[in-house]
Image: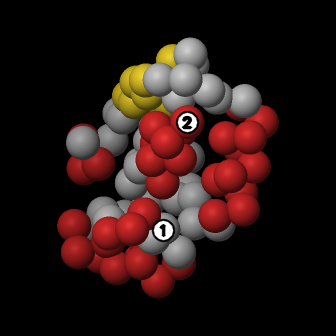
Amino acid sequence: MAGGDFGPRATKELLRQYGVIAKKQFGQNFLIDARVLEGIVDAVNADDRTVALEVGPGLGALTIQLANRARQVIAIEKDETLR
């Protein structure tokens, strides 16, 4: 997504564009609040030595934030519609 915009409108549009619907069986929730994303990355305390493992990266909002700080991000997605 251009510029990493994962606000509500952009997220809904991206999901619609690719025909993705949140699946309850995977407990999917898509992160859209930049403050929450930043708070998570701050809590992880990622730096250029960090290798982060993200399970269920979804649309990649958190992945992008982690990649901006960590040395490496390994993201594993079970939902085939999001691969």
Q: Is residue 36 above or below residue 49?
A: below
Q: Is residue 72 above or below residue 82?
A: above
Three-letter code, disc 1? Phe
Q: Position of residue 77 (x, y in %)?
A: 36, 34
Residue 25 seen in the figure: no
User: Residue at left 71%, top 57%?
Assistant: 36
68 or 35, which is in the foreground?
68
**Which element carries disc 1, helix, strand or loop?**
loop
Image quarter of residue 83 = top left
Residue 64 tag number: none
Q: Position of residue 40 (x, y in %)?
A: 71, 43
- The residue to which callout 2 is attached is 69
User: Residue at left 44%, top 27%?
Assistant: 73
Does residue 36 appear to the left or right of 17 in the view shown? right
- The residue to which callout 1 is attached is 6
Report the quarter where the N terminus lies: bottom left
Q: Is residue 7 above or below residue 26?
A: below
User: Residue at left 39%, top 54%?
Assistant: 59
Q: Which class describes the residues within 10 Å of circle 2: few (<14), some (14-19), or many (20+)?
A: some
Q: Position of residue 31 (x, y in %)?
A: 57, 59
Nearer the camera: disc 1 or disc 2: 2
Q: Which class describes the residues within 10 Å of circle 1: few (<14), some (14-19), or many (20+)?
A: many
Three-letter code, disc 2? Arg
Give whichever of discs 1 and 2 has the lower sequence position: 1
